[in-house]
Image (cartoon, rainbow, N blue to C red):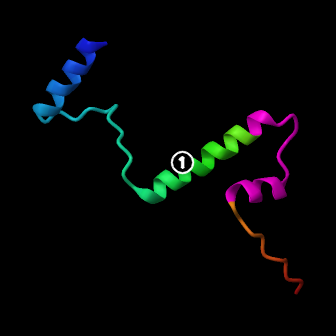
Amino acid sequence: MNEERQAASEHRETGVHDQFDVTLEDADLLGEVELTTNLIIAASESDEHLSDDEIDRILGVTPQPRRED
């Protein structure tokens, strides 16, 4: 494993792009990853499908009442 790290370090120093270096610095993207992770965990812990209300709660969404036209 140490040899792999050394090789990756050498690639970075020579300017070669490491396709596995996926540092996340975008706050919006990190938020989306966290929400998705929360949904995956909740779904994997549930014996049944998550209801729309459960999904909204996990995502922190306050549903708007439907307007009848």
Q: Amino acid at mark 1?
A: Val
Q: Secondary structure at mark 1?
A: helix
Determine whether, in the image, residue 16 is placed left or right of residue 28: left
Q: Is residue 62 magenta?
A: no
Residue 10: image x %, image y %? 14, 25
User: In which quadrant will I find the N terminus?
Assistant: top left
**Residue 58 sits above or below residue 19 on the image:** below
Residue positioned 84% across, 77% down in the render: 65
**Residue 13 sits above or below residue 66 on the image:** above
Name the foreground residue: 57 vs 68. Answer: 57
Determine whether, in the image, residue 38 is placed left or right of residue 30: right
Residue 20: image x %, image y %? 34, 31
Residue positioned 57% across, 48% down in the render: 34
What is the magenta range?
Answer: 43-59
Residue 35: image x %, image y %? 61, 51
**Mark 1, residues whose alpha carbon is within 10 Å: few (<14), some, or many (≥20)?**
few
Residue positioned 52% across, 55% down in the render: 31
Residue receiving disc 1 = 33
